[in-house]
């Protein structure tokens, strides 16, 4: 794990930059690929961006609780800093599920961790763990609005069923050119404000939130 929040953000930014570069190359040639190759590639982009975002949220929150340095050079503190990382992860999982454990123990494995990129869960985790930079992080993560759709799209790609397709239909009203044959096509919907692909708008929101979260 990185030593400071600046390092965490730099690693996230590098991952996103590489994905953006690869996406640009893919977008140029996607029309010449058969649909199954295209959908597979699109799923890969969506999953990779989601994992990068989740990793950033996880590292930023856990480091802040264990003690790190913000971009402003301020050392973070936390009431749970004396606990191990595995114990803090266990507490975070409980908080995400709306409870505070009576007995703190190590989380059994990464499979049991909360969904770190879920901005509906992050406020619960932050408020319960209460690191000294909680307000900065809470404000930053609350600015995520359009990019919450990435989680829905990615989950629908992974679990293709009628219920999840209904979720895609519910969010597509936010975008222009919002037709799709496969959930991953949503990355090419158009943001009516920026007129960019949804993919690009999601990335922009993540970058802005990440830059704010580490201050």
Image (tube, grey):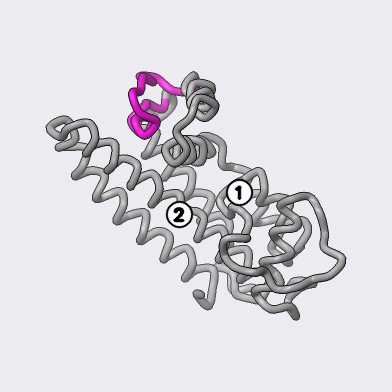
Of pointers 1 and 2, the one earlier in the residue sequence = 2
Most common secondary structure along the magenta stretch: loop
Rendered image quadrant of residue 175: top left
Could you tell me which residue is drawn at 42 percent across and 37 percent down?
A: 157
Picture layout, residue 177 above or below residue 155: above
Q: Is residue 30 left or right of residue 169?
A: left
Is 182 part of what is drawn in magenta?
yes
Could you tell me which residue is drawn at 69 percent across and 63 percent down?
A: 133
Callout 2 secondary element:
helix
Q: Which residue is mark 2?
A: 51
Pick whichever, 21 or 160, lies toward us.
160
Alpha carbon of mark 1 to alpha carbon of mark 2: how far? 16 Å
Pick whichever, 70 or 110, lies toward us.
110
1 or 2: mark nearer the eye: 2
Could you tell me which residue is drawn at 43 percent across and 60 percent down?
A: 12
Rendered image quadrant of residue 204: top left
Q: Which residues are magenta?
A: 174-191
Q: Which residue is mark 1?
A: 141
The x and y percentages for residue 215 are: 58, 62
Is 37 part of what is drawn in magenta?
no
The x and y percentages for residue 20 are: 30, 48
* Crowd tier of the residue under label 2, counting other residues whose Cα lies within 10 Å: few below 14, some 14–19, many 20 or above: some
The x and y percentages for residue 39 are: 29, 36
Could you tell me which residue is drawn at 49 percent across and 40 percent down?
A: 155
């Amino acid at each position: 794990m990185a030593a400071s929040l600046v390092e965490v953000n730099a690693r996230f930014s590098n991952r996103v930059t590489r994905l953006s570069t690869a996406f640009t190359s893919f977008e140029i040639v996607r029309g010449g690929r058969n649909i199954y190759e295209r959908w597979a590639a699109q799923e890969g982009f969506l999953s990779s961006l989601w994992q990068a975002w989740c990793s950033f949220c996880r590292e930023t929150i856990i480091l802040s609780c264990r003690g790190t340095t913000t971009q402003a050079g301020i050392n973070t503190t936390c009431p749970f800093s004396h606990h191990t990382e595995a114990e803090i992860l266990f507490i975070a999982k409980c908080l995400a599920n709306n409870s505070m454990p009576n007995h703190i123990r190590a989380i059994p494995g990464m499979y049991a961790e909360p969904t770190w990129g879920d901005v509906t869960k992050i406020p619960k985790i932050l408020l319960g763990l209460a690191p000294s930079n909680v307000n900065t992080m809470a404000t930053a993560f609350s600015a995520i609005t359009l990019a919450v759709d990435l989680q829905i799209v990615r989950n629908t790609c992974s679990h293709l069923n009628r219920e999840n397709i209904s979720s895609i239909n519910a969010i597509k009203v936010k975008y222009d050119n919002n037709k799709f044959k496969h959930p991953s096509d949503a990355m090419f919907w158009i943001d009516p404000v920026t007129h960019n692909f949804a993919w690009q708008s999601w990335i922009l929101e993540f970058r802005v939130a990440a830059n704010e979260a580490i201050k």
